[in-house]
Image: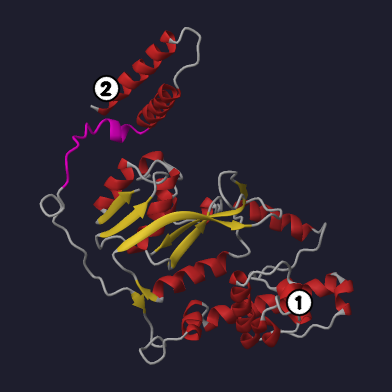
Amino acid sequence: MLEEDLEMYVHEAAVAAEAGGGEAVDLYAQMRHARAVCVKEFFRRNGSVAQAERTWFEVRPDEVYPYGPKNFRAPGPVGIKRTEDNRNKLSFFVEIFDEDLIRYMVRCTNKYARERRLVYRRENRSRWSATSTAELKAFLGCMICAGYAHQPSLASYWSTDEDAGCEVLKRAFPFNRYRQLLRYLHYSWEEFPPRGSERLKVFKAREKEDQVLKVRTVMERVNENSCRARHVGQNLVVDGTTIAFRGRHMLRRYNPSKPTKYGYCVRALAEPDGYILSDKLCGARIDPERMSPDERVMHGIGDELLSPLDLKPARVVNRLTRPFQGCYRTVFCDSYYTGVQLADYLFSKETYLVGT
């Protein structure tokens, strides 16, 4: 059994250490020992797997698991605006950023600009006119263009040099207007808290309970629209990425082993062609008092016996894939998320798991 193999690994590592006689121990033996200790500690804390006395055997899908996908349609965009005759980029943009969401962002931006300019009088030196839905759509489109057309600075997008500049941004906005919108763009209906005010202290206390309070409404709406705008295929992928950011924020992470060392860590659910269905910002907590009983179980809050998954990475996979369970889809994820308990739980929800 697996536990007996672990005991053997620990014994081999101990024998190798004694045989070394004070000399350097083989690195491979150290790695095996460390891995055995970690896995044994996991079994100790996760009694459900250790007590199962699982018998491993070769799986033949056609014989052992004769289940096939159901309720599938061909992957691709959906919606009235995405017909065969009108499949363009603008129609898909409107499905992700729908009119209700754009109007909400316009109201929040204008309210934030109005309140901020009342507090900081020096900003009244530049004239401000309230933005509109059409202007905000153009601004979001320009931000997307600026994301893949990299320039060394913001002003470089309006450069007149032949080897710099971006014609899309220059035709859409003057530089000062674009910078104004970038300053006042806001996603929250909260009142602007001046420095040192009691309102700021209250807001900071609320932000400790929900670190993405200012952007949660937009994030959740974009995730919902992304899922509705596409037929979801049979294969799904859960992986992590880092959004580069070097400013000051409690959710900023540092990972020296990644190409992007500083930034926000995001767990994303995507399809094999790269289309992101939903994502979750790592470390973003929400007040347990605002959770439904079902959400508390998914986050492992409260009675530990009620939580179907013990490890946090497994709960992330379950939370992201939950809307698409029950159709025998296949979820691919790396070893950080993969586990026997997660595989068993997803299989009970008619979903397959493949660890890479």
Instruction: Kindly state the secondary structure of the residue where label 1 is placed.
Output: helix
Residue 125 position by quadrant: bottom right
Q: Please indicate whether residue 314 sits to the left or right of residue 173 in the image.
A: left
Colouring method of the image: secondary structure
Indicate whether 55 appears above or below 324: above
Which residue occupies the foreground of this view, 3 or 295? 3
**Residue 312 location (% of width, % of height):** 44, 44
Which residue occupies the foreground of this view, 2 or 109? 2
Res 210 label: none
Residue at which label 2 appears: 4
**Residue 221 location (% of width, % of height):** 50, 71
Q: Residues within 10 Å of mark 2 (few under 14, many from 20)?
A: few
Q: Please indicate whether residue 86 sits to the left or right of residue 47 in the image.
A: right
Q: Residues within 10 Å of mark 1 (few under 14, many from 20)?
A: some
Residue at image position (33%, 63%) is 324
Q: Please indicate whether residue 355 sits to the left or right of residue 292 in the image.
A: left
Res 180 label: 1
- Is 174 colored magenta in this rendering? no
Instruction: Kindly state the secondary structure of the residue where label 2 is placed.
Output: helix
